[in-house]
C-alpha cells in the first residue's frame, strides 16, 4: 500500500489578507515558518521515504523546513504546482466578487487540465515509491481538486476550509485511491481562520 500524507503549505501574508495566490510566488510569513517547523516535529517519529513538493516557494520552503527533521530525499514535482487563477491572482474576495461575480476568472487554468496533471502526478509518485510512505506539500486548490479526483469525480465540498499546514492522508489499495483523515491541525499551536481557503 502506498501512503501519501498531503500537507498544505504554511501561511503567507496573502493568506492573511484573503488574496488569491495561484502561481504568484508568495513566500511564507513568520507564522508559516513556525507551522512548517511544527509539521516537521509531528512527522519525525515515523518512517518516511521521500518528501515531494510543488516548486512554488511557499510550498518548497515548507518542505525544506519539514525535511530538517527527516533528512530524506526532497523532490520537486511540477504536477502539484498551484492552479493558475489568471487575472484574479492578487485580488481579495471582495475584489473577486466585484470583477468576477460568477467565479469564472479570465485566463485561469481549466479544471480539466488541473485534474489531468494531478492524476499524472499521483501515478508518478506511486510508481516511484510503491508500498512506501511519502509526504506531499502542495496548495489549497490543488488539494481540493486532488480530493475530488480521489472521490471518483464527486466534487469535494468546497465549504471545507483547508488549514495552512493542515495534513491529510490518501492511500492506494488494490489499484484504488482512498481518502483518509483530512485537514488535521492538532499538531499546530496556532490555526488562523483567515488563512483557511
Image (cartoon, grey):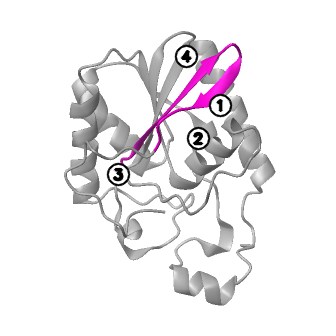
Closer to the chain start, of discs 1 and 4, is 4
Residue 42 horizontal/vertical position (percent): 25, 32
- C-alpha span from label 1 to label 3: 21 Å
Above or below, comparing residue 106 to residue 50 in the picture: below
Q: Is residue 27 left or right of residue 161?
A: left
What residue sits 75% from the left and 38% below the top? Answer: 152
Q: Which mark is residue 80?
A: 2
The reply to whether discs 2 and 1 touch (Cβ–Cβ < 8 Å) is yes
Can you identify the residue that label 3 sits on?
Answer: 10
Provide residue 43's location: percent of width, then percent of height: 29, 28
Instruction: Identify the mark at residue 17; answer none if there is no mark.
Output: none
- The residue indicated by pointer 1 is 121
Dot 4 lies on which element? Answer: strand
Q: Position of residue 98 (x, y in %)?
A: 63, 90
What quarter of the picture does the N terminus occupy?
top right
Count of marks, rendered view: 4
- Kindly identify which residue carries mark 4: 2
Amino acid at each position: 500500500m502506498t501512503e501519501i500524507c498531503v500537507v498544505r503549505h504554511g501561511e503567507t501574508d496573502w493568506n492573511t489578507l484573503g488574496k488569491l495566490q495561484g502561481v504568484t510566488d508568495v513566500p511564507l510569513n513568520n507564522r508559516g515558518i513556525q507551522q512548517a517547523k511544527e509539521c516537521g516535529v509531528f512527522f519525525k517519529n515515523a518512517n518516511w521515504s521521500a518528501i515531494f513538493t510543488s516548486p512554488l516557494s511557499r510550498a518548497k520552503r515548507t518542505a525544506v523546513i519539514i525535511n530538517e527533521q527527516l533528512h530524506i530525499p526532497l523532490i520537486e514535482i511540477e504536477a502539484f504546482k498551484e492552479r493558475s487563477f489568471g487575472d484574479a491572482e492578487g485580488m481579495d474576495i471582495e475584489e473577486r466578487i466585484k470583477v468576477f461575480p460568477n467565479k469564472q476568472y479570465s485566463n485561469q487554468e481549466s479544471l480539466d487540465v488541473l485534474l489531468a496533471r494531478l492524476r499524472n502526478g499521483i501515478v508518478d509518485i506511486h510508481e516511484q515509491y510503491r508500498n512506501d510512505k511519502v509526504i506531499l506539500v502542495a496548495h489549497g486548490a490543488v488539494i481540493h481538486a486532488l480530493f475530488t479526483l480521489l472521490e471518483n469525480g464527486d466534487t469535494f465540498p468546497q465549504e471545507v476550509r483547508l488549514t495552512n499546514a493542515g495534513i491529510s492522508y490518501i492511500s492506494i489499495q488494490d489499484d484504488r485511491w482512498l481518502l483518509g483523515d483530512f485537514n488535521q491541525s492538532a499538531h499546530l499551536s496556532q490555526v488562523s481562520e483567515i488563512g483557511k481557503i
